[in-house]
Image (cartoon, grey):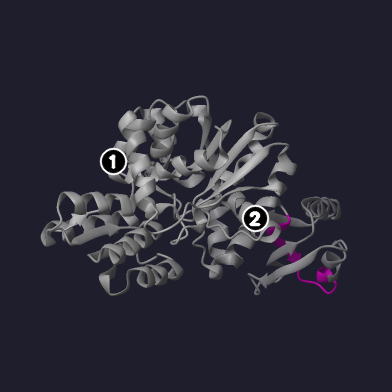
């Protein structure tokens, strides 16, 4: 543990070659809302808009120090680690080959090219990260390059621990609680390892996307396990298997310290931070803030640090984020209405709508029925109670309908 403290402090000092400490900002809005002293450690304001630069830079620096002849680095990444590696490659003047899934948002691909310049080649391989990772490791072995892992590497963990060095220096005291996002576990392992020695009384909560709960699964099994399926929406933290090295440092955690954030609820948090605070967060970057409502009673009157891990958000995804947020909060519903094929039937339904109910979607699904037709309807309102009242009026009037808002199969094909 002492070694990690010294290593993290050296890593923080070395990082000053490329950027100043990211801000630790007191957030008045969240503090007032939850009756706590809430601070945001703004890793979304690093040069690559995520904390990943810390681990990539530190690992590359140490490899170069041990073997100056190594001038080729390879990585696989869905985006943020790729940008950190690209930035470090240009800084050290070494060659980088970066494998990314074909499905990686264009914003992250473009920024990786910008950060790496002529030093970096990007290869888009596979629909999923695991396929990109396999291709990267095969290429790395053939090319005699150094594989720079995104999280399962002691040097990367050491670099991520520099977050804690800065946080304690900036706050000037130990916080009561630190909330950390978890994907592969490198950040959580580094920060908790440093804080265990320097601020042993600080408590932690760890947040995973509900569709990628690899730490939760590992704690349940007592060892890292591979999830059979991962929801990729929170692409910066949706990892099928937590790293072996990070888990070795996190296996002591209590299951109740690990919280799950539903993907659609994260969208509400992203929109709130954007609209209220003007802070752009990617889905993974919003994880730590998203769980604050579930911790309201536990954090009242305490000093809390939320780590906002990344801000690489492609605004082309904003309509999807808004849609998911509305559906989760209940202000938008989709249903299939069985409508009699007679004059006035549609008017009867329209008269059910309240003054704040808007039709966002209207589509006949079956136009050939002689007596009844199926209609896909999307209703958007100002609050969830309005739509609940609409359904109550429809029930009283004898309308036949099926709410498909949360039916993943139907929603995927119809919405």
Q: In percent of the image, x 85 and y 55: which residue is there? A: 397
Q: Foreground mark, 2 or 1? A: 1
Q: Position of residue 84 (x, y in %)?
A: 36, 59
Q: Secondary structure at mark 1?
A: helix
Looking at the rendered image, the quarter that the N terminus falls into is top left
Residue under label 1:
154
Name which quarter of the figure residue 244 lies in.
top left
Name which quarter of the figure residue 374 lies in.
bottom right
Looking at the rendered image, the quarter that the C terminus falls into is bottom right
Q: Which mark is residue 273?
A: 2
Q: In percent of the image, x 39 and y 46: which residue is there? A: 12
Q: Position of residue 29 (x, y in %)?
A: 72, 48
Segment tinted magenta in the rendering: 331-346
Q: In percent of the image, x 69 and y 51: which residue is there? A: 329
* Camera-side residue of 186 and 371: 186
353 left or right, relative to 97: right
- Do we see residue 192 in this rendering? yes
212 left or right, relative to 340: left
Q: In percent of the image, x 50 and y 40: which residue is there? A: 169
Q: Is residue 191 magenta?
A: no
281 left or right, relative to 252: right
Q: Are marks 2 and 1 in contact (CB under 8 Å)?
A: no
Q: CA distance from mark 2 to mark 1?
A: 33 Å
Q: Is residue 334 magenta?
A: yes
Counting other residues with Cα less than 10 Å from the Cα at mark 2, is it few (<14), some (14-19), or many (20 or more)?
A: some
Which of marks 1 and 2 precedes in the sequence? 1
């Amino acid at each position: 543990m002492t070694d990690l403290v010294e290593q993290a402090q050296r890593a923080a000092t070395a990082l000053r070659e490329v950027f100043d400490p990211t801000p630790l900002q007191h957030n008045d809005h969240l503090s007032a809302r939850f009756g706590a002293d809430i601070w945001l450690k703004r890793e979304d304001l690093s040069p690559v808009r995520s904390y990943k630069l810390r681990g990539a830079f530190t690992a590359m620096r140490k490899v170069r120090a041990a073997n100056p002849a190594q001038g080729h680095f390879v990585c696989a990444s869905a985006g943020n680690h790729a940008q950190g590696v690209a930035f470090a490659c240009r800084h050290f003047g070494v060659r980088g080959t970066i494998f990314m899934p074909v499905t990686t948002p264009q914003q992250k691909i473009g920024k990786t090219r910008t950060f790496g310049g002529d030093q970096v080649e990007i290869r888009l391989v596979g629909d999923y990260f695991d396929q990109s990772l396999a291709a990267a490791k095969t290429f790395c072995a053939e090319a005699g390059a150094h594989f720079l892992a995104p999280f399962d590497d002691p040097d990367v963990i050491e670099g991520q621990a520099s977050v804690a060095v800065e946080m304690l220096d900036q706050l000037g005291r130990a916080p009561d609680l630190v909330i950390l996002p978890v994907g592969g576990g490198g950040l959580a392992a580094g920060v908790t390892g440093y804080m265990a020695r320097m601020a042993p009384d600080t408590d932690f909560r760890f947040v995973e996307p509900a569709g990628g709960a690899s730490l939760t699964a590992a704690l349940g099994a007592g060892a890292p396990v591979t999830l059979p399926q991962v929801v990729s929406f929170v692409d910066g933290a949706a990892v099928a298997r937590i790293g072996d090295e990070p888990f070795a440092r996190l296996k002591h955690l209590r299951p109740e310290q690990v919280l799950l954030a539903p993907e659609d609820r994260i969208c509400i948090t992203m929109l709130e931070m954007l609209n209220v605070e003007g802070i752009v967060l990617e889905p993974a970057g919003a994880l730590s803030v998203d769980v604050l409502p579930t911790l309201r009673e536990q954090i009242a009157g305490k000093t809390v640090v939320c780590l906002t891990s990344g801000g690489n958000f492609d605004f082309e995804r904003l309509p999807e984020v808004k849609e998911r947020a509305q559906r989760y909060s209940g202000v938008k519903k989709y249903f299939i209405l069985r409508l009699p094929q007679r004059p006035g039937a549609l008017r009867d339904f329209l008269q059910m709508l309240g003054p704040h109910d808007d039709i966002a979607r209207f589509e006949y699904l079956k136009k050939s029925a002689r007596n009844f037709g199926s209609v896909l309807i999307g209703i958007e309102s100002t609050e969830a109670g309005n739509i609940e009242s609409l359904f109550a009026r429809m029930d009283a009037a004898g309308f036949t309908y099926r709410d498909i808002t949360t039916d993943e199969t139907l929603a995927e094909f119809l919405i």
